[in-house]
Image: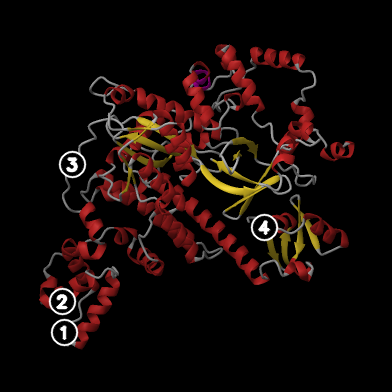
Amino acid sequence: MQNEIINNNNGLFISHLYIIKAFNINRNRVYKWIERGVNHIPLNGKIYIEYNSIPNNTRRKLPSKENLIALTKEQEFNETTQQYYRQLERAYLKQYSSYLPVYKDLNIDLEKAIDYARHHAVWAEILNIHGDKGVRPQLRNLWEAYNRLYPRKYAYNRMNPCINTCKKEGIQRLLVHQYKIDGSHNKYDEIYTYWVAELLRSGKKYSRAYIHKFICELARENKKKEPSLSSIKNWVRQLMPVVASDRYGSDAYNYGKLPYTSMERATESDIQWQVDGWDLPFYMEGFRRLTLFWVIDACSGKVVGYQIAPSENTETILKGLENTVENTSVLPLEIVSDCHSFNKTSEADYFKDMLEKTAGTQWTASSNPRYKSLVERSFKTFGEQYCKDMPGYIGEGVKTKNPDGRTSQELLDQYQKAGNWLTEEHIRMIAIKCITEYNNAKGKDGLTRNERYEAKKSKNAIKIDMLDRLRLFTRTAKYKVSRGQINIIREGVLYEFQLRASLFNQWNDKYVHVRYVDFDEIYLFEVENDRYIGTVPRKQKIHGALADQTEEDKEKLFKHKGRLNGIKTGNKKTFEGIAKDAFSRDKDAAYSINPKLNNKDLIKEFERDGELRRELERQGVSLENVTSFPKVKEVKTYDPEEADRKAVKRRESPMLATEEEVRNFDINKYLEEE
């Protein structure tokens, strides 16, 4: 919603695009308002319409003016918080060195001294912001920014007292708690200890300040001496090991405090799989990251299947498991996962039920990290030993305790310059390459994970054929074909699939069974005998208004020009079919289509290795569409072979539109010609 609503002295103005998309108002109606002269202002390529000038019938469909103003204030609050967070993060990463000598003198280990110095730098920046005589900062914004770096360190109502402590007694006094060892607490009898213990045992987790207040009230009622807050803190420190189980719960105490039994790996391959997801340590533009969900065989440690996606959602997990079953053709006796929200979905219930019916496979969701220790440790090894060598690696995060776990700020700045961001295709390519190297790496026994997996295959794993895979991973539902198309509504989003002309007369106004993996295409089957009918891609929509027109719209018009006379199905995969025909004839010739190199030669490796290329295609990336990796501090050189290739292609396809023709294409002239 950023920059879609403006609130100033002249009134509340809403972007016309926001009105159309967010509130489902007809586009033509909005443009008629503007033509009739409603109060509006043009700004940054958009038209902002004054809220009160919107016709009453339409305004009733919109949120109230007060709600929209509240949204703008929330937006401003988030922007201010983000600005403060960047300042505090910069202090955390770059400005701590001057405070390090102070904490080295405390006779503590270097790692702890660095943590204190970083924290000191953050509070120094907070005092700098708070003491600015210009615009006084909102304390809530400052606390939110601090809470991102140090979650749950201080409650909001403690922020102002902490600032006052830093100003009066110094930042070191706030950070380093020095307890007086003078036996002063001995002047209180055992009753005080009992009171504190009872309060600590409460699952409500009373704070030390609350316990102090409560104990003082009890002391006054029983005519006893009121203890100081320092005494309360001393009692809490002494009693915490005793009451930890009641205060934090049995699971946290059992898994986090008590001794544990070491667990041996599975004795054979494919009797237990462990699954988990991890954010890949590479940034796309806008600091976006991709998630790697993978399945580890608990005997060999091999990655037997995976999926790369923007997030670890239900779709990602099911696709990763489907890839695993496709690769191994078996199901294990057990699959172990953490307590992910996936386990609470109806898709998970259906999938687990089918697992048990198909192969007797048990799904174990455990919050105990030791139960799935193999997959927990595997990501650290994967990031440190394989991802770190790749271009764009950002490190283990600002909170890592590993002193060598952070990429230098100077190199990060280089990665984040315009033109140097990695694309989604680059990151997928890096992940596939690293997974291949991970599985092919030799261990202490001289075997790779692939070899270890093959050597210890279990006879107890359940064989899975194509029909079993369809039952497990392909969703089925009954839909009626209406007006030549099928509409599927999922999470409030309408997905439209329009039948091609050859299927229209036969199946219009009839029921069919629909199976789908995602919403790019669906598969149709007859209701009576489940016979396959055909595949229908998702209906493509193209903007007609010049203001909404994008480069993608232009490409769609060129691709779909031949489909305007009745065939509504997409030829989205036509080029993929051509590419597959080329691979079947001459793989080497097909792989040589993109000769550009990057600083890790990854594209060339994918061109040479067909297995890597097929994995890349499974992730939805066509190598022909992958641009070269950005080369930091290198000048792009002219490639005569690439130029010759383009010239030959142009001579062979004289009707093919050039990039310049696509850029200069006028959609309105095209529509008039039709």
Ranked by sequence position, the earlier of labels 2 and 4 is 4
Q: Residue at x 22, y 65 (%)?
A: 246
Name, please, the residue furthest toward the front: 528
Query: Sequence-wise, which precedes: disc 3 or disc 2?
Result: 2
Q: What whole-number distance in Å separates the C-alpha atoms at marks 1 and 2?
A: 10 Å
409 is higher (above) or lower (below) than 169: above
Q: Is residue 66 left or right of residue 131?
A: right
Q: Position of residue 3 (x, y in %)?
A: 66, 55
Within 10 Å of the Cα at label 4, are there few (<14), some (14-19), or many (20+) other Cα atoms?
few
Q: Which callout, 3 or 1, points at the residue further toward the start of the chain?
A: 1
Residue hosting label 4: 22
Above or below — where is 301 with respect to 149? above
| Residue at the disc numbered 2 | 192
Q: Nearer the viewer, mark 1 or mark 2?
A: 2
Q: Which residue is mark 3?
A: 262
Pointers 1 and 2 in contact (CB under 8 A)?
yes
Closer to viewer: mark 3 or mark 1: 3
The part of the chain drawn in magenta is 601-606
Q: Is residue 69 magenta?
A: no
